[in-house]
Image (cartoon, rainbow, N blue to C red):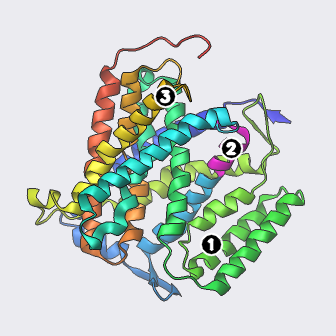
Amino acid sequence: MVRRTRSTLRGFLVNEASGGIVLIAAAVLAMVAANSSIAEKYFHFLHLATGPVLLKQLGPMTIHLWINDGLMAIFFLLVGLEIKREFVDGRLASWDRRRLPFIAAAAGMIVPALIYLAVAGGNPAVVRGWAIPAATDIAFAIGVLALLGSRAPPALKLFLTTVAIVDDMGAVAIIAVAYTDHLDLVALLGAGVVVAILYGLNRGGVKHLGPYLAGFAVLWLLVLLSGVHATIAGVVAAFMIPIAKSPGAPDSVESPLHRLEHALHPYVAFLIVPLFGFANAGVSLAGTSLASLAEPLVLGITLGLFLGKQVGILGSIALAERLGFARRPGGASWLQIYGVALLAGIGFTMSLFIGGLAFPGEETLVDQVKIGVLGGSILSGLAGYLVLRFAPRRRPVPGV
C-alpha cells in the first residue's frame, strides 16, 4: 500500500521552517539569559552534574553533555535517515541530480575552511577550528526562507535543502575523522558487531523498528566509550534502517525509514534542536569590546561563514553552468541564487557543535567560537533575507 499524502520532503520543509523559527527564538532566549540577572543560574543549570561517569574524559554527565552527546545523537539519526532517503528514493537518487548539490556543497565547505585558515591559521592554538565555518544550519536557513513566503520559489527551497543534506554528510565525515583523538578498540569492535547485527536484520527483512532502536541505543553507548563522538552512532544506525522505494508516490506506509523519519521530525525540530540552541548559544558579552571581534578565531569564523559560503556556492554554480556540467535550479535568477548562497552561511547548530569538539574544555575559545558563529550567521541571514526579499520575481521556465 502506498499512502498518497504530501511528500516526505515537503513535510520536512514545513517542519524545518517552523522548527527554524523556534530555534531562532531559543537562541535569542539563550543570549538574554546569559546576559541578564539569571546568567549565573543559566550556566549553573547547564553544568549541573547528573551522573553517571560514562567516560573519564567527559567526567560526570551534565545536562549540557546529555543534550550535546545524547539528544544530538537523535538529531544525527534523523540526519542519517534524510541522507539515506534522498539517496535511495529522493532528489539525490540519480547522478544527474547529485551533481550540482555535491559541487555547491563541496565548494561551500572548502572555501570557508580556506578563509578561516588564511585569517586564523597563523595561531596554532586555533587551527583545529578550520571546520567550524564549513557547516550549514538547515533549520535556521529554511526558517529564514519561510519568512519570505512566495518570494522564495519552491525550486530554491529544494535546492537549499539538498545542498544542506550533502553538507551534513561532509560535516559527519569531518567529525568522525578530524575530531577523534583516542580510540578504545574493544568498544569500537563492539560497535562493529552491533552494526553487523543491524545489517543482518535489514537483510533478513525485519521491518519492526524496535530492534533497530534498541541497537541504536547500544551502539550510541559503545561509540561514546570508543572515543569517536557518540553522535556518529545516529548516522550509522540510520543507514541500517530499511527503506521501501515508492517511485511516483510520496512515501510508503510499509517503509520503516519513512515511519521513523515522520515520527522523529517533530521532536527533533521543536524540542531537540531548540534545546541545543538554548544550551549552546548563550555567551556572556560582559567585557566584550570591538577589539574582541577582531580576534583571529572570531574573525576567521565570521568571514568564513559570511564570505566563504557565498563565494564557494555561487562561484561553483556559475562555473558548473558555464562549463555545461550542471544547470542552476529552474526558474531562479542569479540574484536569487546569490541570496540562497548567503543563507547557506548560517552555520549555527552544526558550527557550534563542531566548535565544541574543536576546543573541548577551553571556555575562552568556545565563547569566541559562539561570537564568531553568531556574527557570521546573523550577517548571512540578514543579507540573504534582504537579497531574496527585494530580488525581482522570475517566472519558472517550462520544462526546466
The answer to whether the residues at label 2 and label 3 have Cβ atoms under 8 Å apart is no
Judged by its main secondary structure, the magenta piece is helix
Q: For the N terminus, give its image quadrant.
A: top right
Image quadrant where residue 279 sits: bottom left
* Labels 1, 2: front one: 2
Q: Determine the CA span between mark 1 and mark 3.
A: 35 Å
Callout 2 environment at 10 Å: few (<14), some (14 to 19), or many (20+)?
Answer: some
Magenta span includes 69: no
Q: Earlier in the sequence, mark 2 or mark 3?
A: 2
Q: Say which residue appears at 71% left-offset and 80% top-offset.
A: 190
* Labels 1, 3: front one: 3
* Residue type of the residue flagged with mark 2: Phe
- Check disc 1 and report the residue beneath it: 220
Circle 1: element type: helix
The answer to whether the residues at label 1 and label 2 have Cβ atoms under 8 Å apart is no
Front residue of 174 and 370: 174
Circle 3: element type: helix
Give above or below for 64 relative to 328: below
Q: Say which residue appears at 79% left-offset and 40% top-offset.
A: 245
What residue span does the magenta drawing correspond to? Answer: 81-91
Give above or below for 24 relative to 248: below
- Check disc 2 and report the residue beneath it: 87
Give above or below for 317 relative to 135: above
Residue 151 place in picture, x, y as percent: 41, 21
